């Protein structure tokens, strides 16, 4: 177990970081499956272990997975580079392609992961004819750290844009975890909540527990407590009742993937909250970075919904909750149509009532890498 | 532990029954908090133990609680009656009043419990001037058994009425547990599903797990498996996604309490499913006996929503799921407005698009005790 260094970090808790230098360094992940009880950091030096951590949700949150994936390329190549001879192109190309494939396939829905790995591949291809293998690894680590730093900066901008949108007081419902543990910075939706609180808005956050893996209960509640933001936990199925009784003035959630028309894939249950918010006339905000948009997907009908293991629902923390052999529907994500989204908050600005045209305008308006 | 006697019972699993005669008899409850893992029957001879069983949800489901409450009056009075002298009115009246109060206050929202206890009180008052204490107990046991038998019969009628309404094939979503474990018979909403299946309808039931106490996972899935009805378990928050993907053709749930205008209180999450069904154009049925109606309540705004203990959400089966001190909103029930209900299925018939007038008509149409 490693203790985080508060001086270096934007929040008390972090999900992903690089520790050490190039040749002696490694990736550190907080094992989020063991929260809130145990604070265990995994020292990751092998992409198969990283792949398992992504599959098991030990590391989670679209941006954090992207950052972890970028560092994953480095941990796979450094040991080879130390003994490699010849040009990078000859000695590392196959290993890089292997690491890329193993990591990109660990979570097919995570567009940030693909985006980060493609940046790493671009970097590799740009420099493979003029750098030695170890120089290449140094360049790749620099690229991974840049991806990480950019995320920190864009979280800050999203938090500022989102905090301005939230009401000056009242109950704000959120689902799943979109905080520092899910990103490289202060988080997306959760960053907005923390920033609103820090600006003096009198908000009371309601965190849906987010079955089956309880990210809302285990992570969001914990992070908001750390940040001193008033938080109340509830079962996912209580959201409607809270809305009907006037306790919720806005909803803000993150996104795993946003289509060209604004349809948004996010943790199972997000669409449910969006329908309920619409029914009760409550604004529904999505906070997500630029890299979450996938303009190649015209709309949500094209998103493949990953079906996860039945035992996530039948068992919890090792305890049997249901007949051991009952069939289970366990979609990992659902798709919220753009029509239910009041606004999408990005680091570049806010897209009110998102449409294909408004998204295209924002996407065209800047470089893919915000200035750091 | 007692094994159920299949020959005597309407289903393999039962929630409540009387065992033995008058003087040596007692109430038997299946401890539903220990399902699906352990099948433990509680031998109940003391109303404080019964009260605790009701509070802890060891016995649950509005009809089953009513039946258990009725037998509870008997177990409290028999030991006193054995040694009592004089008229019943003098020797047992205070004890009866005490038992009534202790039981009625164990679950203030459960109108069936109040209704059953009031029937027991009416019986007591009708006969207290001409029966000896032991004769009175025998009469009260007869009344409790009649309440139980009536429930069995009305479950059969509700099941028939509900099965006729359900589509000939497709997915049917249900929430919480409304089966044999919750009633004295085959159940209400779940009875309709079993009857539809037995009539050859090709239904696929989706059972929401029903956080926080997981009655859908622990009980409904188990009962449907026993009844050989195809069942798939899902997280409560997946209902919306299943509806959007065309997998649900109808919803059927039970009720804890129905107001004069049709507003319906039921397990937390029911209202959520009702809103989602409305949004997706899916019929939403409530199956409940006559005794669930509380015509003294004009509408749902008058229903007191019981707030249950925070640890039901923060912990599950002894495992910590959230920070141990995080505040929790844990409403036991929510209220579904009549406007979201396609039809209420009762033992007396079906009330389509329930209104105050239609409910009053049905309520006025028959005696309070169906013929057995």
Image (cartoon, coloured by chain):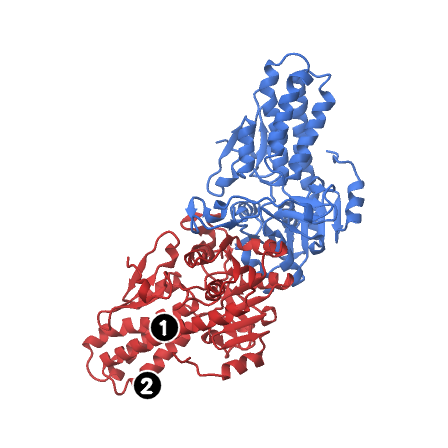
Chain colours: A red, B blue
In the rendered image, residue A148, in percent from the top left (x then y), is placed at: 36, 72
Q: Residue furthest front?
A: A200
Relative to residue B197, is residue A37 drawn left or right?
left
- Residues tagged 1 and 2 counted as in contact (Cβ below 8 A): no
Screen quadrant of the N terminus of chain A: bottom left
In the rendered image, residue A313, in percent from the top left (x then y), is placed at: 47, 54
Screen quadrant of the C terminus of chain A: bottom left
In the rendered image, residue B28, in percent from the top left (x then y), is placed at: 55, 31
- The residue positioned 79% from the left and 44% from the top of the image is B360
Q: Which residue is mark 2?
A: A126
Relative to residue B244, is residue A195 drawn left or right?
left
- The mark closer to the camera, 1 or 2, is 1
Which chain is disc 2 placed on? A
Q: Which residue is mark 1?
A: A148
Which chain is disc 1 placed on? A
Asked which secondary structure carries label 1, the reply is helix
- The residue positioned 25% from the left and 87% from the top of the image is A130
- Between B178 and B256, the one lying in front of the other is B256
Q: Which quadrant of the view contains residue B13?
A: top right
Q: Which quadrant of the view contains residue B47?
A: top right
């Amino acid at each position: 177990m490693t203790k985080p260094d508060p001086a270096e970090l934007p929040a008390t808790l972090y999900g992903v970081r690089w520790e050490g230098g190039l040749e002696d360094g490694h990736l550190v992940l907080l094992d989020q499956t063991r929260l809130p009880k145990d604070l265990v950091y995994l020292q990751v030096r092998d992409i198969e272990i990283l792949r398992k951590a992504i599959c098991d949700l030990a590391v989670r949150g679209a941006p954090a997975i992207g950052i972890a994936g970028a560092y994953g390329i480095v941990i796979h190549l450094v040991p080879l580079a130390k003994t490699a001879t010849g040009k990078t192109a000859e000695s590392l190309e196959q290993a890089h392609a292997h690491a890329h494939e193993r990591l990109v396939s660990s979570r097919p829905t995570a567009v940030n992961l693909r985006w980060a790995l493609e940046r790493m591949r671009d970097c590799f291809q740009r420099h493979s004819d003029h750098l030695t293998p170890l120089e290449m690894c140094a360049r790749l680590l620099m690229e991974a750290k840049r991806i990480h730093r950019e995320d920190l900066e864009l979280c800050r901008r999203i938090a500022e844009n989102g905090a301005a949108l939230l009401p000056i007081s009242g109950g704000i419902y959120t689902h799943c975890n979109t905080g520092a543990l899910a990103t490289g910075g202060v988080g997306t939706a959760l960053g907005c909540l923390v920033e609103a609180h820090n600006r003096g808005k009198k908000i009371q956050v309601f965190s849906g527990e987010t079955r089956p893996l309880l990210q809302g209960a285990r992570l969001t509640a914990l992070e908001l407590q750390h940040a001193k933001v008033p938080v109340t936990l509830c079962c996912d199925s209580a959201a409607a009742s809270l809305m009907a009784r006037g306790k919720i003035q806005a909803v803000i959630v993150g996104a795993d993937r946003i289509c060209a028309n604004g349809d948004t894939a996010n943790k199972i249950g997000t669409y449910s909250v969006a329908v309920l918010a619409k029914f009760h006339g409550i604004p529904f905000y999505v906070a997500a970075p630029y890299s979450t948009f996938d303009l190649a997907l015209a709309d949500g009908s094209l998103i493949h919904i990953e079906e996860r293991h039945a035992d996530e629902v039948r068992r919890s923390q090792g305890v049997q909750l249901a007949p051991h052999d009952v069939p289970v529907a366990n979609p990992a994500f659902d798709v919220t149509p753009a029509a239910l989204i009041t606004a999408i908050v990005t680091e570049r600005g806010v897209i009110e009532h998102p449409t294909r045209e408004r998204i295209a305008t924002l996407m065209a308006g800047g470089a893919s890498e915000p200035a750091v």
